[in-house]
Amino acid sequence: MGEDSQEAFPFGGEPTDTRGRIMQATFETVQENGFAGLSIQRIASKANLSKSSVYHFFEDKDDLLLAFLDEMLGQFGGL
């Protein structure tokens, strides 16, 4: 994809695995809907996955959000 897609996703370009796709979809969903608009269904749809695929990696939405925030902090220097 082009440079614009890399700028939209701070994790370093296109994800190469399912967990990365979920993280990217979470980021895009937050951009579009804010944290209040997050749902596993929206994230799964954005990642072109089933909800059960998301639940394979994360116990619930809170678990996913903690992993997402940890990933974000890691991308910005491990604050």
Image (cartoon, rainbow, N blue to C red):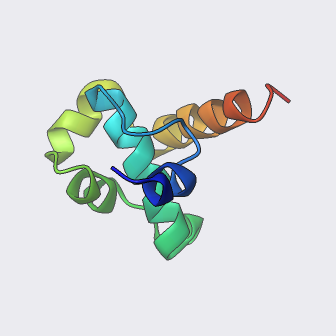
The residue at 50%/53% (across/down) is: 27
The residue at 13%/46% (across/down) is: 50
Q: Is residue 39 above or below residue 32?
A: above
Q: Residue furthest right?
A: 79
Residue 5, quarter of picture: bottom left
Residue 48 horizontal/vertical position (percent):
17, 51
Task: Say left or right for 61 vs 71.
Answer: left
- Residue 1 visible: yes
- Residue 59 visible: no
Task: Say left or right for 75 vs 7.
Answer: right
Residue 68 horizontal/vertical position (percent):
55, 39
Task: Say left or right for 50 vs 9.
Answer: left
Q: Give the number of callouts.
A: 0
Q: Which quadrant holds the C terminus?
A: top right
Residue 12 horizontal/vertical position (percent):
52, 35
The residue at 56%/70% (across/down) is: 34
Q: Is residue 60 above or below residue 77?
A: below
The residue at 35%/41% (across/down) is: 22
Residue 59 horizontal/vertical position (percent):
37, 31
Q: Nearer the viewer, residue 19 or 2?
A: 2
Q: Nearer the viewer, residue 65 or 21?
A: 21
Q: Is residue 64 above or below residue 25?
A: above
Task: Say left or right for 53 vs 6.
Answer: left
